[in-house]
Amino acid sequence: MTRPLIVGLTGSIGMGKSTVAAMFEAAGVPVFDADAEVRAMQGPDGELVPAIESAFPGSTDEGGVSRDRLGALVFGNPEELARLEAIVHPAVARRREAFLIEHASAPVVVFDIPLLFEKGGASAVDRVVVVSAPAEAQRKRVLARPGMTEDKFAHILALQTPDSEKRARADHVVDTGTTLARTEDAVLALVAELRAASRARPSL
């Protein structure tokens, strides 16, 4: 019996990672969305709400954690961000382990992790897939988002590993700078390749 081949899916802001993750899911590959898990744990009655309110008083309300209030407390403050991550990351790890147990018989699973390289997560996966697009396409997508500004975009980019480095470190690159149909074809071909690689591994 072998465990699933674990694929780390990542990409810089505006590169189309969520779209590609949805394509993996549509192809029948289980996807663990780290950001979605965090949102669920910080929502109304979320398991992290009491701990976050205790560490950051005033950061929650009846809807759970207020991303705006919490963001104002930790944005640009490495020490406060580290305190928050010490609450959030262990909880995400527990959910990820439960996900792996649930999908133990799947040949391939995907961990959708935006900061895979930035947080040192690449060593914990078998393959790294980077979603990428030309810089101008990325820029147009991001600046079209509500509330996004040139300054915010620049700050986010400064915190992320450059796209060129991600591409260089990737096992596979999915280009979203083309049509959706071509991107989907590329994902389907990649899924077939990953499933074949999973079957070829020796049993544990």
Image: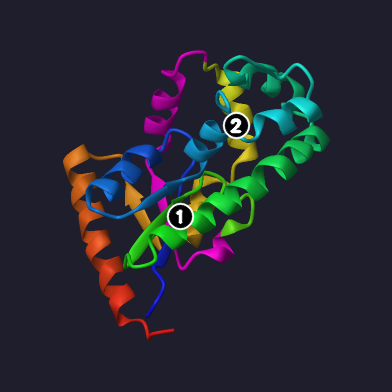
Q: Secondary structure at mark 2?
A: helix
Residue for badge 2: 156
Instruction: Kindly report the distance in space between the C-alpha atoms of the residues bearing marks 2 and 1.
Output: 29 Å
Check residue 73 for magenta coloring. no
Binning the other alpha carbons within 10 Å of mark 2 as few (below 14), some (14 to 19) or many (20 upward) gives few
- Image quadrant for the C terminus? bottom left
Binning the other alpha carbons within 10 Å of mark 1 as few (below 14), some (14 to 19) or many (20 upward) gives some
Q: Is residue 130 above or below residue 64?
A: below
| Spot occupied by residue 189 in the image (x, y as percentages of width and height) | 21, 60
Q: Secondary structure at mark 1?
A: helix
> Depth check: 67 or 191 in front?
67
Name which quarter of the figure residue 104 lies in. Answer: bottom left
In this image, 102 relative to 166: left or right? left
- Image quadrant for the N terminus? bottom left
Answer whether residue 117 is visible to the viewer in this image: no
| Spot occupied by residue 45 in the image (x, y as percentages of width and height) | 58, 27
